[in-house]
Amino acid sequence: MDERETITLYDEEGKATEFEVLGVVSVEDNDYAILIPMDEEDEETAYIFRIDTDEDGEEVLTVVEDDEEFEKVKEAWEALCEEDFEEDYDEEYLEDDDEED
């Protein structure tokens, strides 16, 4: 069983929300975390946060507000997911071929 990596984020009022980290993608020298809320029924909703470094050298997540930046990250994430799907499919296909011999 795969263990999920989770992170807890706090809003302005101090309310905690737990997220599953789907992955990290790099676009134009920046890294972005792709997160989904653990408590929402709609698992189709993902959030994109840029991974920045604060003045103390700690990593912080910053909401991506620029539409162009958001679209670039979204496209990079979708391409990465597509590659992973194709790799999984190829491995499954090869395993099936080996079993037939």
Image (spheres, rainbow, N blue to C red):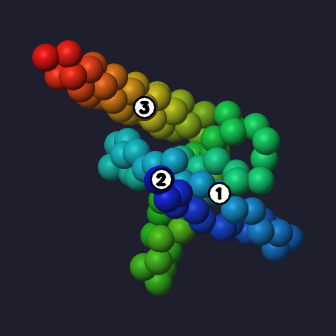
User: Residue beneath label 2, please?
Assistant: 1
Q: Position of residue 3 (x, y in %)?
A: 49, 59
User: Residue beneath label 1, please?
Assistant: 19
Sort mark 1 into few (<14), some (14-19) or many (20+) by Cα contacts within 10 Å. Answer: many
Q: CA distance from mark 2 to mark 1?
A: 19 Å
Q: Nearer the viewer, residue 99 or 64?
A: 99
Q: Position of residue 46 (x, y in %)?
A: 63, 41
Circles 1 and 3 in contact, beta carbons < 8 Å = no
Q: Position of residue 13 (x, y in %)?
A: 86, 70
What type is the residue that disc 3 sits on? Cys
Q: Nearer the viewer, residue 18 or 96?
A: 96
Sort mark 2 into few (<14), some (14-19) or many (20+) by Cα contacts within 10 Å. Answer: few
Q: Is 6 on the left-hand or right-hand side of 51?
A: right
Residue 31's disc number: none
Residue 80: quarter of image:
top left
Residue at the right extreme of this rendering? 13
Q: Image height check: is 2 above or below 47?
A: below
Residue 49 visible in the picture: no
Which quadrant does the C terminus fall into? top left
Q: Secondary structure at mark 2?
A: loop
Q: Nearer the viewer, residue 35 or 85?
A: 85
Q: Position of residue 74 (x, y in %)?
A: 51, 33
